[in-house]
Amino acid sequence: SLFFILETHLPTNNINQTYPMQALNMRCPAGMQAQSLKSRRPVWARPGRRGMLKVNAQQAVAPPPIDLDAKYCETVHATKRRPTRTVMAGKVPIGSDHRVALQTMTTTDTKDVEATVAQVKKCADAGADLVRITVQGRREAKACQEIRQRLFQDGYDVPLVADIHFQPAVAMMVAEAFEKIRINPGNFADGRKTFEQINYDDPAEFEAERAHIEEVFTPLVLKCKELGRAMRIGTNHGSLSARILSFYGDTPKGMVASAFEFAEVCRKHDYHNFVFSMKASNPLVMVQAYRLLAEEMYARGWDYPLHLGVTEAGEGEDGRMKSAIGIGALLMDGLGDTIRVSLTEDPELEIEPCPRLAD
């Protein structure tokens, strides 16, 4: 773990450079472009022998120089927390002026109101500051109204976070009840992957799709602004949209670009009560993505808080160590304002490791 933290404590590159792919040791030749010259599929996505890539010599280019002045944290010599604005999720403040908020996520069927309410109570009693609940469809969204009211009636005001995928209309419904909405830029507007062969080599063609994102996303932004709800723009390494994959490949650069498209819609409507996350199941990918995100926010003068987590970390010691490597490295950088240790165990058990990392 110590070797990992020391090894990854390196400056990242600008979002417009290709070096992060090389730095992540993602089994691609140095500086190789994410898009094949002859194929619409990312070059690195086509496995070759022994897990290496089939790449022609002309597809490899010299890596760009590392920008040693790039800033992704306050200092690389000590842990100094990155200054952020405060985002309010119900009663819980998230930001650098407050302690790191602890989160977990229920595992019950959301339509089972009794079971979900009971599990949220266990999580709150264990010390969770926020509890996330998956909301797959309209029936789950209707159940969320009852879940929120039941918890209030029983004296539990822990803020609830709706986990939304593919369903903008459902997000609008649950925003009436829950204090925070998590959206995934990879599937909120683009929908389910069709694996259609799309080529966005032309940046103008790529940018033209942003109008659709704004059209689909704006109603939720305005709703959250009106109701005082918080939002997490949560990119996942394993679920980037087909459009982003076609242009950037499955890279940290694509993760950051995807999140920023949605953030710019929020900013356009003067809505700033949101946080970012850049999750991946590989701690090395996750760390690089967050550092690249932080670097770009420094460059733009943005100060939004960060939610940290390693997806599908597992269970037992392995799951805890995997989360500790990724979350711990970033907390040492001074990055991170709310965290979740994702384990394949009962959700209340995720809370115990969190304060040991945060403190």
Image (tube, rainbow, N blue to C red):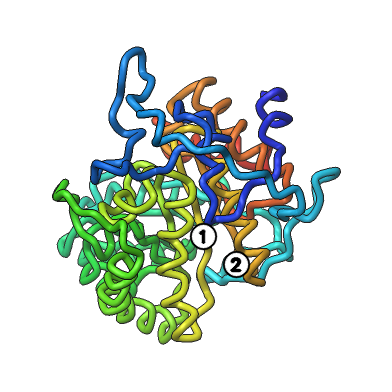
User: In the picture shown, does residue 328 fall above or below 142?
Assistant: above
What amino acid is at disc 1?
Phe
**Under tag 2, what secondary structure?**
loop
Total labels: the figure holds 2
Q: Residue furthest front?
A: 58
Q: Nearer the viewer, residue 51 or 241?
A: 51
Q: CA distance from mark 2 to mark 1?
A: 7 Å
Q: Residue furthest right?
A: 77
Q: Which residue is mark 2?
A: 304
Crowd tier of the residue under label 1, counting other residues whose Cα lies within 10 Å: few below 14, some 14–19, many 20 or above: many
Give the residue displayed 48% in from the left and 65% down from the top.
Answer: 157
Residue 359 screen position, x and y as percent: 74, 43
Identify the image quadrant of residue 84.
bottom right
Identify the image quadrant of residue 187.
bottom left
User: In the picture shown, does residue 55 fall above or below 173?
Assistant: above
Query: Which label was assigned to residue 276?
Result: 1
